[in-house]
Amino acid sequence: MDAVSEDLSLLPATRRSLGHRIAVAQREGRAPSLVAAVVRGGEVVWEGSRTMVEGHGPDGNVQYRIGSITKTFTAVLVMRLRDEGLLGLGDPVEKFLPGTGAGEVTVGQLLAHTGGLAAETPGEWWERTAGTLRPELSDVLGEHPFRFEPGRRHHYSNPGYTLLGSIVEAVRQRPWEEVLRAEVLEPLGLERTTAQPLAPHAGGWAVHPWADVMMPEPLEDLGLMAPAGQLWSTTGDLAKFAAFLVRGDARVLSAGSVREMRTSATPPEPGLADLGYGLGMQLTQSGGRRLAGHSGSLPGFVAGLWLSEEEDLAAVVLANCTSGLPASTLAADLVGIVAEAEPRIPEPWRPLREADPVALELCGPWYWGTSAQAVRLTYDGFLELGPVGGSGRSARFRPEPDGSWTGLSGYYAGESLRSVRRPDGSVSHLDLGSFVFTREPYEPEAPVPGGVDPQGWRGIG
């Protein structure tokens, strides 16, 4: 590894900018306390805190309630079940939880908040009342659980994640919290992430909107709603979790599956993250960077976790106030401060260990009609297809055992790219979802859809 790329430490000026940003946020947001961390290259490279208590500040070991960041943990459990073949994202709820009245909704729709379910539970506000008021799923869903037809639009639903937690319990035949501990928290070393607070932990406060006074918020066990927002955690643990959400971990979930979680599964919805929603992850854009993560809030606490795969950066912010401090925005700002002050040093260029002659034969210029395209073989053995000298559709393609290639992004995601050969074995053209790519524009000998004018190319005369 090049020595330059190994140094993850931040420059003093960057550290001061981070410290200044959280100091301003704590003061303007009037938060009793705030703790933050930045992760680069999978390691914590900066930690900071601010507090109203003179001479004392929280650190990366102090627990705060993280609210809806819990949903991402629940989504990881569901994706594990999917990868084990124990459920499919297209499976209906009825398959696992019969008789709920919401059985037509699929697992994937619940993960992406497209199931059409209500945003909240019926009755008293679930975040500020005891979970014992909702002992059954019927209490969580109510008599009329739907607000929209399933699959038609994104509508954030807390009860939807209660259903997901109950599906985990039904499949594993163990409580959600127990499964989470054994399958995610322990393998990742998240010893300070728990369903109930463990000292040292912050107390939750409500700060008066028009006066510098405050009062404690009640602490409730959410019962069945726990998979939507119960967890307590620390910046130390969430930094490890953020690194996992970038890289994956074979003991928990593969890099491909966490990448799938970070991929938009629903269009943007006004008022929510502006790139849509993935599978248990919010998506947004800040400073020209694509971010994935989640915000969180419960009475007395706000939280934010964002990561940039491209920059290999993540930031976590936790505070103990009901409102006032935009923790999610602040976390995005911390990512931006580091990314702009100290751009990521790219990995050194390296050639392929072994060149595949079949793949090499596909490299170079191709034409889709008159549009010039190029195919490149990259160091990881994948193909890249994109326009030459202009904008247009581009994608990466993964090799398959049968000699075809599967699109991984953009318009061609999931589509199959095949090389079609002549009787003598040479490549005639590329077939991509019925599109024909030829070595020359509208090559006469290739099977161009609709045929090629027999007079060929001509001038105006």
Image (tube, grey):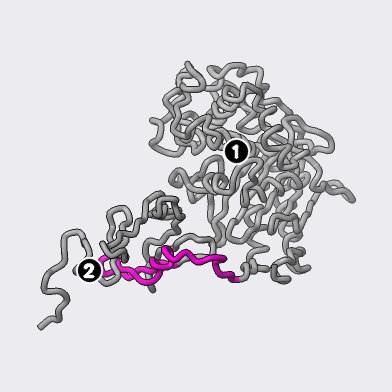
Residue type, numbered disc 1:
Val
Q: Which residue is mark 1?
A: 76
Q: Would you say residue 437 is visible in this rendering?
A: no
Circle 1: is it few (<14), some (14-19), or many (20+) Cα within 10 Å? many
**In percent of the image, x 11 and y 70: which residue is there?**
454
Residue 253 is left or right of residue 25, and the answer is: left
Q: Earlier in the sequence, mark 1 or mark 2?
A: 1
User: Which mark, by number, is residue 442?
Assistant: 2
For residue 374: magenta?
Answer: yes
- In the image, 98 versus 156, the foreground residue is 98
48 on left or right of 338: right
Q: Is residue 403 left or right of residue 263?
A: left
Q: Position of residue 305 (x, y in %)?
A: 65, 48
Could you tell whether 370 is left or right of 287 in the image?
left
Picture quadrant of residue 11: bottom right
Amino acid type at circle 2 is Tyr
Q: Residue furthest right?
A: 55
Residue at position x 65%, y 46% in the image: 249
Determine whether the residue tagged by mark 1 lies in a helix, strand or loop: helix
Q: Position of residue 437 (x, y in %)?
A: 30, 63
Residue 428 lies within the magenta run: no
Span colored in magenta: 349-376
